[in-house]
Image: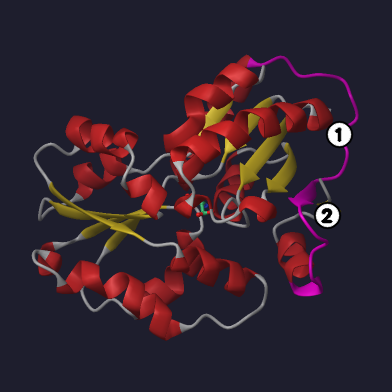
Amino acid sequence: MGHRALIFDSGMGGLSVTDHIRRETPGLSLTYVADDMFRPYGSKSAAALRARLPGLLATLEIAVRPDIIVLACNTASVTALDVIRDAVRAPVVGVVPAVKPAAQESRTRTLAVLGTPGTVKRQYVDDLIANFAGDCRVLLQGSTALVALAENKMSGRKVDMDILRREVSPLFEGRFGADIDTVVLACTHFPLLMDELKSVTRQTINWVDSGQAIARRIKSLLLELPKDSREEPPDCALLIGPEAAPARRRIFAQYGFGKVVGLYP
Ligand code: DGL
């Protein structure tokens, strides 16, 4: 009895947020949905995401009946939060790049936003920078390959460090790269690669993501919502696409999703 949250991402990136949510709101029932069939979101057009996501989330809302929807995907949030909110009844919390805390913490006033190509080119991010980091130099870097590397890691496969280095090094080797002291991990997949990212970065970096802030926001929103009396089912993960491979199931189980179901649309 209590509340249920629907956590949504294109893949396993939302698991980096799930950890924070479990710590902040123990006992909250969670249903995780990964849109495997349409990943990566970061290379899709805004029009394609705005066409797909409202209907999909509205359908999932009917099936899962969550009290709150967590859009654990920066790309989806900065592209389609408005149309998704219009399509569903539950409150929607969107994960967006943590530009504000990063700007507050940067001493060199030089920070980077490392997200998907889709995220770093959206107006939403330009507005965040203008509003909260106006006195900072902000370097933008988009990567789709890092999403695939995070998915590989979460499926028990090796992370190709050459690719990882290739994706990240232009940021630090370019003009002003040496001044960067803070990097916004603006894709929920990227905190899953924290150890690997640290291992290829020579300078000391404060890596900032939105997980903790989102978990606090969810907790405070839930305090305002009435609890219902239905018996909550065990936490489960729904994958839009084929069944999960055993290694992927094991990772979901480690994050508390003992049941993993493939949904064939
Ligand atoms: N995890 C997602 C994000 O936060 C998107 C990854 C992708 O599918 O490109 O942006």
Q: Is residue 19 left or right of residue 139?
A: right
Q: Position of residue 89 (x, y in %)?
A: 67, 17
Quarter of the image with the N terminus is: top right
Residue appearing at x 53%, y 39% in the figure? 48
Q: Is residue 173 visible?
A: yes
Picture quadrant of residue 241: bottom right
Residue appearing at x 61%, y 15% in the figure? 224
211 within the magenta span: no
Tags 2 and 1 touching, CB below 8 Å: no
From this view, report whether residue 157 is shown above or below residue 181.
below
As helix, strand or loop, the secondary structure at mark 2 comes to strand
From this view, report whether residue 160 is shown above or below residue 25.
below
**What amino acid does circle 2 point to?**
Gly
**C-alpha separation, residue under disc 2 versus residue under disc 1:** 20 Å
Quarter of the image with the C terminus is: top right
Magenta range is 225-247
As helix, strand or loop, the secondary structure at mark 1 comes to loop
Circle 1 sits on which residue?
A: 232
Q: Is residue 78 left or right of residue 57?
A: left
Name the disc covering residue 262, or none. 2
Camera-side mark, 2 or 1: 2
Image mark count: 2
**What amino acid does circle 1 point to?**
Glu
Name the disc covering residue 205, or none. none
Q: Position of residue 134 (x, y in %)?
A: 12, 36
